[in-house]
Image (spheres, rainbow, N blue to C red):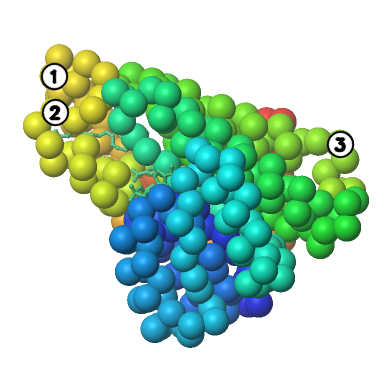
Amino acid sequence: MKIPGAVVIVTGGSRGLGRAFSVELLKRGARVCVADINETEGRQTEAELQRQYGADKAFFVKCDVTKEDDTKDLWRVAVERFTTVDLMVNNAGIMNETLVEETVQINLMGAMRGSMLAFEHMRRDRGGKGGVIINVASTAGLFPVFFMPTYVASKYALVGFTRSWASNPCQARFGVNWAVLCPAFADTSMLSVALDGPDPPLVTYQENKEQVIATVKTIGINSVDDVSRAFVELVEKDDNNGAVVTVEKNMGGAVYRFVKNPNCL
Ligand SMILES: NC(=O)c1ccc[n+]([C@@H]2O[C@H](COP(=O)([O-])OP(=O)(O)OC[C@H]3O[C@@H](n4cnc5c(N)ncnc54)[C@H](O)[C@@H]3O)[C@@H](O)[C@H]2O)c1
Ligand SMILES: CCCCC[C@H](O)/C=C/C=C\C/C=C\C/C=C\CCCC(=O)O
């Protein structure tokens, strides 16, 4: 899709990857609604984005993606402000293996709820203008990772959900493209919180510390810019329906796998 003039909602946009995606979209002429549960960081981000790109180009809405009412309010406010939404980026997420219910509620149900509201708004067969839904999963949504099975489950399910919608035979009639961005480790607070503490919230970390560290070293850590570049490329690609894009630092930089047929990886 063309980014200039597009209207975008980014969940989990107060910091980290979501904030970086918002900046890249604004730089290219989009208008962005940043949604996040963290109001303090959200307001700071809103002030910086408005200062840099204009007060009419970006705003923040406090939204907990696990709450249906918050998500509906987010859509109501975004449409009131910008009239329509062309791109929905379901990016909000957590990684903490001690928070099983929360992980599923945020990473999976939050993204599914955001996707369905976007789909209802965008689908052409019900009067919408079409659009794109990008769900931020992880390479942990494609391959097993022994030290974070709950996180992996939430991301596998999100990949399956997104690719299933992308493969719907009525997809052309709906006019909504579905894609998944799957970064490996990325340099944000999600990672630093896990890396910095003596006891990361991972499964059997103390027993398998060396293997965890070796895994991170082998795969490498993407910069936020690596992931943002892949994100922009995915958004700009016209035929992005069913695309699964991985970003892996030690695979020779960022690696983008665009999959045209959503039924095979
Ligand atoms: N950092 C990584 O290594 C990495 C790798 C692959 C995928 N991801 C995924 O990328 C996405 C962004 O992660 P990040 O690395 O920027 O992490 P981050 O912790 O820096 O940012 C996550 C954002 O989501 C928000 N959030 C959390 N719960 C929420 C809720 N209930 N409602 C609304 N917002 C909520 C947080 O407040 C925060 O602003 C996540 O889905 C994550 O799983 C991250
Ligand atoms: C292999 C898949 C990579 C997916 C990354 C995923 O989406 C997000 C991960 C978030 C947090 C990091 C998880 C584990 C690493 C944590 C600790 C390693 C400890 C290293 C050390 O003690 O030095």
Q: Position of residue 16 (x, y in %)?
A: 35, 56
What residue is shown at x 62% (from left), y 64% (from top)? 78
- The mark nearer the N terminus, 1 or 3, is 3
Ligand 2 shown in quarter: top left
Q: Residue type at mark 1? A: Gln
Observer-side mark, 2 or 1, equals 2
Q: CA distance from mark 1 to mark 3?
A: 47 Å
Residue 98 or residue 233, whichever sits in front: 98
Q: Are marks 2 and 1 in contact (CB under 8 Å)?
A: yes
Residue at which label 2 appears: 199
Q: Residue type at mark 2? A: Asp
Q: Residue type at mark 3? A: Pro
Q: Can you tell which quarter of the image residue 233 is in? A: bottom right
Q: Position of residue 242 (x, y in %)?
A: 69, 42
Residue 21 or residue 242, whichever sits in front: 21
Residue at which label 3 appears: 169
Is disc 3 placed on a helix, strand or loop?
A: loop
Residue at which label 1 appears: 206
What residue is shown at x 31% (from left), y 30% (from top)? 96
Q: Position of residue 202 (x, y in %)?
A: 25, 25
Q: Can you tell which quarter of the image residue 56 is in? A: bottom right
Circle 2: is it few (<14), some (14-19), or many (20+) Cα within 10 Å? few
